[in-house]
Amino acid sequence: MTDTDKKHRPRVMVIGLDGATLDLAGPWLQAGLLPNLAKLRQRGGAGRLRSVWPVLSPSAWASFATGVNPGRHGVFDFAQRAPNSYQLKLVTSQDLRAPTLWRLLSEAGKRVAVINVPMTYPAESVNGVLITGLGTPDQQVFSHPPELSSKLRAQGYRVNKSVFYRPGREDAFLKDVYAMTYQVGETALSLLKQEPWDFFMVVFRDTDELAHYFWKHMDAEHPAHNHQHDEQWASTLKDYYIHLDQWIGRLVDAAGPDVDILVMSDHGMGPLYKDVYLNDWLRQQGWLKTVARPYPPGGWLGQLGLTRSSVSEFLQTVGLAKFERWLRARLGKAIQLLPANNRYHFPDAIDWSHTQAYSYGYHGQVYLNVIGREPAGIVATPADYERVLSMVENGLKGLQDPDDGRPIVSNILRQQDAFQGPYASLGADLVIVMRDMSYITRQGYEFSPSHKSFVSRPNSFESGSHRIDGLLFFGGPSFHSILDIPTCSILDLAPTIMYILGLEVSNKLDGQVLLDYIADNNKLTTNLTDAYHNIEALSDKNLLTESEEQELLERLRNLGYLS
C-alpha cells in the first residue's frame, strides 16, 4: 500500500490505561458513563486483551512493546537475580533483549512520541520524543532528547507522585492522582500538537493504583468492605474511569478523524483476598532451609520497630514524603545503618546449600536451586530436576486455605509452557495461578511475619490485585466496525501497529496481525518477513546508582510490589 492508496498517511495513537479492566469499564459503558470509549467501540470494536505470565507491569508492557513473550525479551518482574548471585537487582529498559516497537518504527523512518510508558527508563534514542514512566528515579534525565527533561521540569512536570496511599490520607492521595493525570494528559496534548508523529502513545497509570487500594470500598462482597465507612470512597474507581474517558475524548479529538486509535491495558484488576507466603510453605515441606539467626532480623533496632520501612511509612502518613527524599539525600549511606525492616527476607535468610526450591515475585513464581544456574545450586541432574519439580507441583495442587478448606491453586504452568525463547530459563520453573487470582505472593520472597501460617489476610493496604485479562478498544480508518471481539493477546498489538504503518512484520514475533479487524482497503499484500533480531541486554553496566536503586526500591515497596 502506498500513500496514494489512502487520502491520508496512516498514523496510530495508543492510549494505555494501566490495569484497566472490562469488568468495570463494560458495565459503566453500558450505563452511558464512558461516551468516548463507546464512540470508539462503534468505530471499531472492543474486547478483552490477554496479558502474559507473570501478570506484572514490567513483563506485560515489555511484551506489548516488543510483540514477544518474556522468554524472548527477558523481562519477567520488577527485579531479577543479579548475575551469579541470589541478590535481586531492579530491571530497567536496558534489560530488554528484543527491539521495541518505537525502536523499529524509528529505524524505518517513522516519527514517534512515547509518554509515560512503564519500564522505559533510561530513555532509548528514538526518531522523535520519549518520556519515561514507572521505574524512573527522581532528579534524572528522563527523556529523549535529554534536554526535553529540563524543559518539562521547568513546567512543573513530575516523574513520580509525591503522595503514597495510606489509610486516612485518601484525600491527599487522590488529589495527587488527579494532578499527575492532568500533567500527563496536558503534556500529551502539547506534544501531540507540537511534534510531527506517525506513532503516538501515552499511558495513564492510576487505574492500576486506585484498583489496588480502593477495590474494597466499591465491592460490598469484599471481606475487607466496611458497610458503615466505605460509602465515601465507593465511587472512586468509577469517577476516575469517567475522568479518563474525558481525557480519551480530548486526545482523540486532537488527533483527528484520520488517526487509528487503540485504547488498551497491560492487565486487568480484581479483588484481593489473601497473601500466600510460598517460602514458608516450602520450608514446612522441607524443600527450603533457613539459616540459624541468634537475633531477630533487624537486630535491636528492628526489635524496637525502628527500620527504614517504618520511618518511610511514618513520614508518608504524616504527609512528609518530600522530607523523606531530603533526609535520604542528606544522610547518604548512613541511612543503611537502619535495617530495611524486621522480617526475614529472601535471599539472606535462606541456607542455599540445603535448599531445593524457593520463591520470589508477585504472582507465585517458584524456582529450583539448580547446579550451574544458581550460584549454590544443589539440584544436580535432569532426573533430579524432574523429581523435585513434580514433588513441589503435586504439593501445590493440594494447598488449601485453612479458613475454608478449599484449594488455593487453580493452575500451575511449567517454565516451558509459560515462556518460549532463548531467555525462558530466566523465568520461574513453576508459575502458580492462584484461585481466581485473588490470592497472591506479593511478598513471595519474604517469610510470613508470624511464621504461624503461610496464608494470611493481605499484609498491606491493598484490596485489589492483577488479573490476566485487560481491555482493548479500537477504531479508525484502518478498522472495520465490529463492536465486540473475542479475546486477543497483548502480543498482537505491536505487529498490528507495524502493519497499519506499512512496516514489514516479522513472522518470528509471537503476536499476530489482527487482520480480521483491518478494513479490506487497508490490507497489504506482502509485508511479512523472516527478519528478526534480538538485542544485547545492557543491564550489567550498573546503570542505577546506589541511591537511585534505593529510591526505586522504596517506591516499589510503597506500591506493594516489593517487600
Image: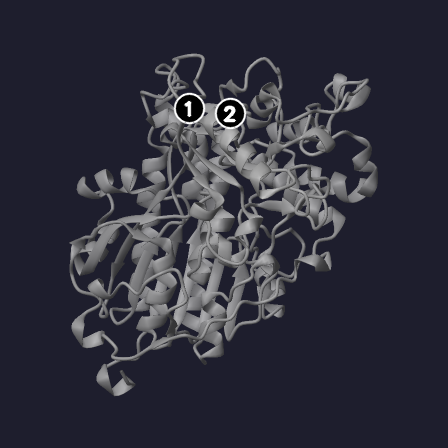
Residue 338 visible to an observer of this rendering: yes
- The residue carrying mark 2 is 276
- Disc 1 marks a residue whose amino acid type is Ile
- The residue that appears at 78% across and 20% down in the rendered structure is 293
Q: In which quarter of the image is the N terminus?
A: bottom left
Q: Which of 105 and 400 is in front in this view?
A: 400
Counting from the top left corner in percent of width and height, residue 68 is at: 44, 59
Note whether 120 is above or below 6 in the view shown: above
Note whether 10 is above or below 484 in the view shown: below
Q: Do labels 2 and 1 touch, CB within 8 Å?
A: yes
Task: Say whether residue 542 is left or right of residue 224.
Answer: right
Counting from the top left corner in percent of width and height, residue 145 is at: 59, 71
Q: Which residue lies furthest to the bottom in this view?
A: 4
Note whether 18 is above or below 400 in the view shown: below
Counting from the top left corner in percent of width and height, residue 350 is at: 70, 29
Dot 1 alpha-carbon crowd within 10 angstroms: few under 14, some 14 to 19, many 20 or more: many
Circle 2 or circle 1, nearest the eye:
1
Instruction: Say which quarter of the image contains residue 39.
Output: bottom left
- The residue carrying mark 1 is 408
Instruction: Say which quarter of the image contains residue 31.
Output: top left
Task: Tell me the number on the disc at residue 257.
Answer: none
Dot 2 alpha-carbon crowd within 10 angstroms: few under 14, some 14 to 19, many 20 or more: many
SS under mark 1: loop
